[in-house]
Image (cartoon, grey):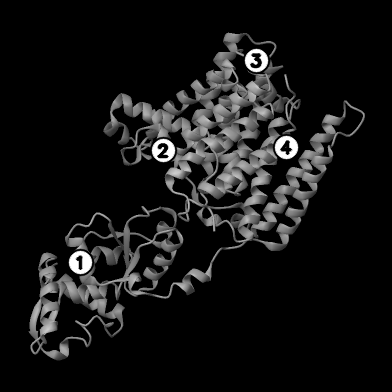
Amino acid sequence: MTRYSDPYLCGVGIGVVLLAAYVLVGHGLGASGAFSSVVAAGTAAVQGVPTAASSPALAPYLDHGVTSPLRDWLVLELLGVLAGGFASALIAGRYRRTIERGPAVSSSMRIVTAVAGGMLMGLGAKLARGCTSGQALTGGALLSVGSWVFIACCFAAGYLLAPLARRLWR
Amino acid sequence: MMPLTETGVLALSGALWMAPLLGFAFGFLLERAGLAHAPRLAGQFYFTDFTVFKVLFTALVTAMLGAFWLNRLGLLDLELVYLPETFVVAQAIGGALFGAGFLLSGLCPGTSCVAAASGRLDGLAVIGGILLGVLVFNAAFDLISPIYSATALGRITLAQLAGVSTGVIVSALTAAALGGFIVLNRIRREGSATAIVSARNRVLLATATTLALAAVLFGSRTSVEASPLVAGLPSERDYISAIDLGERIAQEDPTLRVIDLRDDAAFARFHIPGATRTTLAALATDPLPLEITVVVYDDTGVTAAQAQALLHRRGHASVRVLRQGLYEWIARVQEPRLAADATMEERQAFERAATLSRFFGGVPQAGVPRASVPIGYWTGAAADGTPRAQTTNAVAAVRRRGC
């Protein structure tokens, strides 16, 4: 198993990728937006496009009757993220089918908290119009006020609640 | 100037091809940095692992300095780069919920994908949770939407909020991040005897410091390029006559978009059939399809010319200003006039206009005194007079008739 790369060097690399996105396509990177597209496409498949598109929450993702998530930039980008993560893990010998958890937590407990945490993040990212990628990183680097509000509140909440969640990770 | 998609160099399909490539590099680097492991990420909240901070803020500072300097050098137009809009309350509450979820799950949306891709089933569970969270949001949108759209500040940067130049903010944030890295390095050093700062990181530190210091001196560039405006002195291609426009509207030309730039009240009183009202600000943010012909008009031609310049800069090839604005439409399409002693040439032009006029419900007038037909009316030369006053009067006349 290879050691991890220097975080600062990886950071510079990700910064350059983000800058390339600004320059090439005029917007940054994202992750949660792709989840929104997938959910919108799924809802449209179940309810039918007209019903789904009548919801103001879904309409922006079903523009012009486009219901294939593969037409969405962020979905394609996130598929790239999956492939890139897989490739790097494989090359470094870190690919392993396992459940990573704190020392005092059972696997099933870990899965429950992972789903619950994911739900909170899904809700939070929708409300904030972006996550650590689309809001903190992309908007933060462009000095968006809302992005910095998001960064401050995200870490403030994480640190304030950390003592309560100590058993999960310590 | 870049970005390439906005300036028309890279087509939308090209941008779609970039997506998986940029995503691949992003995912690869996240995994290389060790961000696929939830316990490592959660360690940040217990002061045992600062990889998230180091990676996040190094990337942020790199992109921030890069974007600032490319803009400063005139290579990147930041006005055209998507800037997330600010909604203070929604982003504060959303951020707090997100932070709580981050703590519980140990991963964020991007890193959960990398974790899942490297075989971690907990990463897969987080992905499932996020999808559920989005579903809940969509289902409860009616309840949430007042919070979602409250305190909207639009596109606003920290520099605009603080009333200082962008360079000052860029430098301050860079200094804060670098200072933070130095402190983190000391915490980490407690266990070991020697400082662990590689020569490469010293170079990175020095580069960031230099770029940040220089940024204070240079503020920010608001990009206005004079050359395309000067080079593009008005040609026939920049204008359209009311008659030509009327014929294209009558033929229901699908590649035509007519845009009215006057205010709401003026638009409500009278507008060219099929026109949509918009503002310069809206044109700057909402892209129109590049392949259509856009016709812009107002009363005076000033706003229309600004809109034309704006759309040209966005890569639109075919943008035309309605010559003489709405006045010409009223004078030539709504009320074409023919002098009693008209020449053959004038009669032919009148016939064409009169057909069109009837189509749009206008009133062609033949046999009027020569004095009431402006000089050059049928020969295409610019009409005389002050367009705004004439337009106002002409609109009033049309209204009286109940068009």
**Callout 1 amino acid:** Gly
Q: Are marks 4 and 3 on the same chain?
A: yes
Tell which subunit mark 2 falls on: B
From the viewer's perspective, is residue B140 above or below residue B377?
Answer: above
Tell which subunit mark 3 falls on: A
**Callout 3 amino acid:** Arg
From the viewer's perspective, is residue B357 above or below residue B342?
Answer: above
Crowd class of label 4 (few under 14; some 14 to 19; many from 20; radius 10 Å): many
Say if mark 4 contacts mark 2, CB within 8 Å: no
Q: Name the residue under label 4.
A: A9
State which quarter of the image contains the N terminus of chain A.
Answer: top right
Numbered circle sitting on residue B246? 1
Q: Name the residue under label 3.
A: A101
Q: Can residue A104 be seen in this view?
A: yes
Q: Give the Cα separation between the discs numbered 1 and 2.
A: 43 Å
Q: What is the x, y in percent for residue B401?
A: 12, 71
Q: Is mark 1 on a helix, strand or loop?
A: helix
Q: What is the x, y in percent for residue B212?
A: 73, 53
State which quarter of the image contains the C terminus of chain A.
Answer: top right
